[in-house]
Image: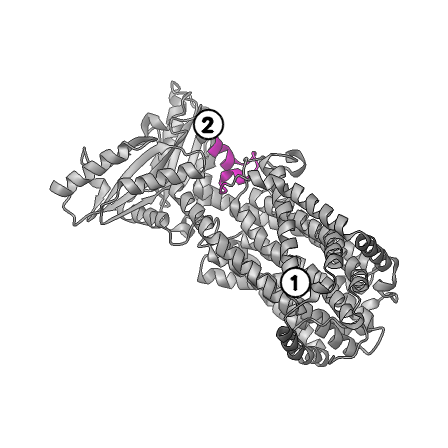
Amino acid sequence: MLIALSSAAVRHAKKIVIAAVLLAVAAGIYGSGVARALAPGGFEVRAGEAQEVARVVEQRFGQGSPDLVALVSGMTPADPAVQAELAALVARLEADPAVASVASPVGQGGAALMSIDGDTAMLAITLRGDARTKETAYDGVAERLHATPLTVEIGGPLAVAVIGQQTAEHDLVRAELVAFPLVAVLLAVFFGGRIAALLPLAVGGLSIVFAMGMLRGLAELGNISVFALNIVTLLGLGLAIDYSLFMVQRFREELEFGTVAEAVVRTVTSAGKTMLFSGVAVAVSLLALLVFPIALLHSIAIAGALIVTLTVLAALVVLPAGLAWMGHGVNWPRRPKPATAGPEGRGWARLAQVVMRRPGIFAVGTTALLVVVGAPMLRLETELSDARIFPASFEVRAVQERLEAPEGFAIAGTVQYAVLLRGEGDAWQGEQLAHLQATHAAVAALPGVIRVESYAGIPRPDLVDGDTTLMQVITERPHDAPGRAAQVDALHAATAGWRSAMVGGAPAVAHEVDTALEGGGVPAAVIVVVVTLVVLTLAFGAIVVAVKAVIMNVLSLSASFGALVWIFQDGRLEGLLGYQSTGSIDPLVLLVMFAIVFGLSMDYELFLLSRIREDYSESGDARESVARGLAATGRLITMAGLMLIVVLVGFASAEVLFVKQLGVGMAIAVAVDATIVRGLLVPATMRLLGRWNWWAAAWFSRWWVKSNIGVHELPPGSPLGR
């Protein structure tokens, strides 16, 4: 298949390149508004109980958590002018067609919505319509809030979502502005200033533009989180650099031994086949995130698999066509010398020899180093993202911190649950009323409950709709996930016996996410590990190197997780990285890192082991094949890792803490993988295991050779069909 594909790329080179450019222009035009088409947030369980409660409470009871919370500062209770201005502000908001209700000190909220010191008023604003309608109305409502001489700060879930969407878009532009120029410089250095340096950037640009267009189309069919944009750019540019770097360098080597057409075909059938295995591993690792019923992870899985597929297609179809069209012009303006003949190759070979002279010391030493770096992971604290993902200078974060401060408002330290109870008909009297009164009393007696409002006691018709009644429960704020779980479980136990009882509210949403993460963690990990084992076993026809690669990936990940705890949870490097520690790590960051890093590690593993495997197949020398394989790929792997780190550093400059943690964590993982693991641990373990690296059952070896399914990295200039 790859021979036919590469031959077609040679025959129709100009047509393929021109068609790709035209399609990219069309995709770029269509996808230019993709950020506005994507949904903010996504940190909730799809079709979860808490989401259903929120929908019913809003539609049937006309209630729910406010979309916006505005803090009006500088209040002087005795100043009639200030009070008149506040009343006028509330009146303007209530007159806005987009606003459903406003709770304020001058309205239904009363004194409870004034700060303890009487200096700040709180406005709790609920908007009309669905999520998309509210997002559209946000700017207009925010403008009304700020059109007053009073000092107003805006927060709340809608503000967090909209500001997060806008900030993610700005972070993306900043990351691209940082990454593209630096990567271009590194490529120019690697290729000696030749035109070949432009090709990886061109492939990355094509992949990203196509993905933006397709994401725009997917957004029309369903909700895709705006944070998927960051993953598309990160993976699109990172994988394009990896794949193109290996493909272009291999093509330049092949030009020394034959015609342009032969060089293209040999490049695709060797480096291209390795790249295809890598793409499958990365895509399936990302799709494992679909195990979790969380909107953000679904978006990242879909967007990630999409960009990986598009990058592989661009590198297998468009890049070979471009190479065939350019031919020897890829080396303009001067003729290169083969990279493996240079001092860099000899340096990597010498390093491998040094490591293999004392493999036990290096294997134990590097493993111990990675374990020590990963040790902080043992005290990992996880917490879902909220307004604290923004810098301290952002209004949305300032509002949340003031609301939670003990000296702020009376509601500080409390949370609200919404409990829906479905009875046996709409007659809320007699036996059913007695049941509700007993439930009310049981809930009120639970530890931590401050107040319960329901139809029991003083009848409130606004809390009954047909066979369903609403119970509002105010409790002390749980300090951690176990406390949150205990509260939700206690509410479920106290409301048992009804035809249906559902618990909603912000703590219930977070508890659902916690439960989903716990339930999906093992299946997702099993999928990623099994896929990695299968891909590497098929690629090299040996199970030992596959198992060893998984163990090394786990060590790399544990080291990066430990570094994340040390940096972000412990609050190190706050000044350098420009963030304020929350004392925890978002668990979704760890999951996304696990899926992406496990897949990306396959790039370096496949390209290194493919050269070692080929040399070993010919020479039978387990020691020298490692040295020669590392000499052939060491400089490439180091440069590919360095450029990917540059891309990730661009994301480390993000203002959103979620993206910053992801960028820093992955940069550390790639740095560890491309240096310590590939340069030291791989040679050491391969020397210790010797021929056992390539062991496989006899029947499998016969099938593997006969099927020709594996990676056979041919030395430059070798004939095809071996």
Residue 460 appears in the figure: no
* Secondary element at tag 1: helix
Residue 238 or residue 342, whichever sits in front? 342
* Secondary element at tag 2: loop
Query: Residue 332 location, x and y as percent?
Result: 84, 67
Q: Is residue 1 left or right of residue 160?
A: right
User: What residue appears at the point 30 percent right and 49 percent down from the top-left corner?
Assistant: 56
Residue bearing mark 2: 405
Q: Which mark is residue 544?
A: 1
Residue 455 or residue 623, whichever sits in front? 623
Residue 517 appears in the figure: yes
Q: Is residue 220 left or right of residue 720?
A: left
Query: Residue 115 location, x and y as percent?
Result: 41, 25
Graded by Cα atoms within 10 Å as few (under 14), some (14 to 19) or many (20 or more), the crowding at tag 2 reads some
Is the residue 547 above or below the residue 443 in the image? Answer: below
Q: Is residue 700 magenta?
A: no
Instruction: Give the magenta part as a residue range.
Output: 383-401
